[in-house]
Image (cartoon, grey):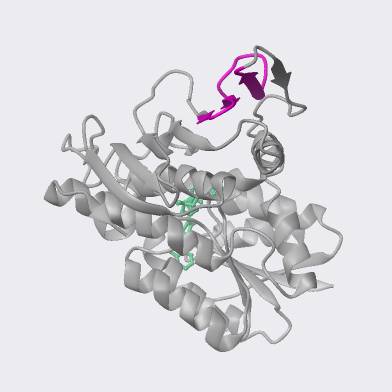
Amino acid sequence: MINIGIIGCGNIARSRHIPEYDSNSDCVLTGYYNPNTAKAEEMADRYGGKVYASAEALLAEPMIDAVSVCTSNDSHAALSIAAMRAGKHVLCEKPMACSLSEAEEMVRVAKETGRLLMIGLNQRFMPAHTEAKEYLERGVIGKVLSFRTTFGHGGPEMFMKVKDMNSWFFRKEKAAMGAMADLGVHKIDLIHYLLGERTVRVSARLNTLDKRSDSGELISVDDNAICLMETESGALGTVTASWTYYGRPDNSTVLFGSKGIMRLYDDPEHSLIINLADGNVITGRASPMDFRAPSGVIDSWIESIKAGRVLEADGESALDAMKTVFAAISSSETGNCIKI
Ligand SMILES: NC(=O)c1ccc[n+]([C@@H]2O[C@H](COP(=O)([O-])OP(=O)(O)OC[C@H]3O[C@@H](n4cnc5c(N)ncnc54)[C@H](O)[C@@H]3O)[C@@H](O)[C@H]2O)c1
């Protein structure tokens, strides 16, 4: 039985990590830490396990094998590194870190300590995306020449019990980055996963257009970003990330290949649909997107721990996605195309 500790008992821990661990018969929820202890106590009462007075106390618990780091972005790297040094395997939420050097250090410490490091890049596990990967590997749409991918919704406040425009999500000192790192990183990682290629060049523009704190000032991180990417094979595409899609969210990806076009979560009826150049149409098995469905991250993480290697979304692939995010920020600041 794998003993799990939870660091940070906010929205993602409560809605995804904790219930998904609870449903997995190979692990047990053993401990929780949150600065506001009431949140940790609520989880311990509901799911069992002990509340710790600090992250250090939780990490010093010999019984705990692995932790989920579900805190605000500013503490991801330090907590993950401390956890690996304390002998724990780490599943850390995205974005993995606030700077390139922090992200690189996380990967380095994973290697040095021999601990597993996975990042919560859950788009890899969405049914139409795993199905798409199968079609791509079989060459059904040929070579991917270009793509567009978008993740936009009304912003983090949509998921808060009480709307808080002064939340850490909107403050640079806690979040470091906005929509591009929060949502864009998912889509960059998805493109890397689907194409099996990394990004080599980036031009981007990040702006804060609409979101304001309670005092009426624009928030200090980007709420919209558009990034032009070139992958290793020369495929060109755009990644759009937005916190200001105030109607229906857009979580779609379209891949334009030499033999056809694949649409993922783009068609109202079919989560995966392929229009081939010869006129044939293939529709996938995946059902429509359902945000209440289990993410698949935790089951894969538990299988990874059992296997002794990260099966999907390891620290290195997350680092590749973050390199693209940081290049996009740098491109927006300098006006230059950034080579990675
Ligand atoms: N994979 C996804 O799709 C996805 C979705 C939502 C959020 N997230 C990520 O998960 C992380 C948390 O987001 P959230 O929506 O749960 O935020 P949240 O504000 O609801 O929860 C964060 C929790 O962490 C606690 N915390 C802050 N600093 C801490 C520290 N040093 N030690 C322990 N606890 C600490 C806070 O008290 C809070 O309870 C963010 O990095 C976010 O980007 C990922």
Q: Quadrant of the rendered structure where residue 240 is?
A: top left
The quarter of the image holding the N terminus is bottom right
Q: Is residue 270 magenta?
A: yes
- The magenta stretch is 254-277
What residue sits 59% from the left and 54% below the top? 13
Q: Is residue 162 visible?
A: yes
In the image, is 4 to the left or to the right of 97? Answer: right
What residue sits 55% from the left and 45% below the top? 195
Q: Residue 11 or 331: which is nearer the viewer?
A: 331
Q: Is residue 151 above or below residue 46?
A: above
What residue sits 32% from the left and 46% below the top? 178
Q: Position of residue 311 (x, y in %)?
A: 69, 62
Q: Is residue 71 visible?
A: no
Q: Position of residue 194 (x, y in %)?
A: 58, 44
In the image, is 219 to the left or to the right of 249? Answer: left
Q: Position of residue 234 (x, y in %)?
A: 40, 45
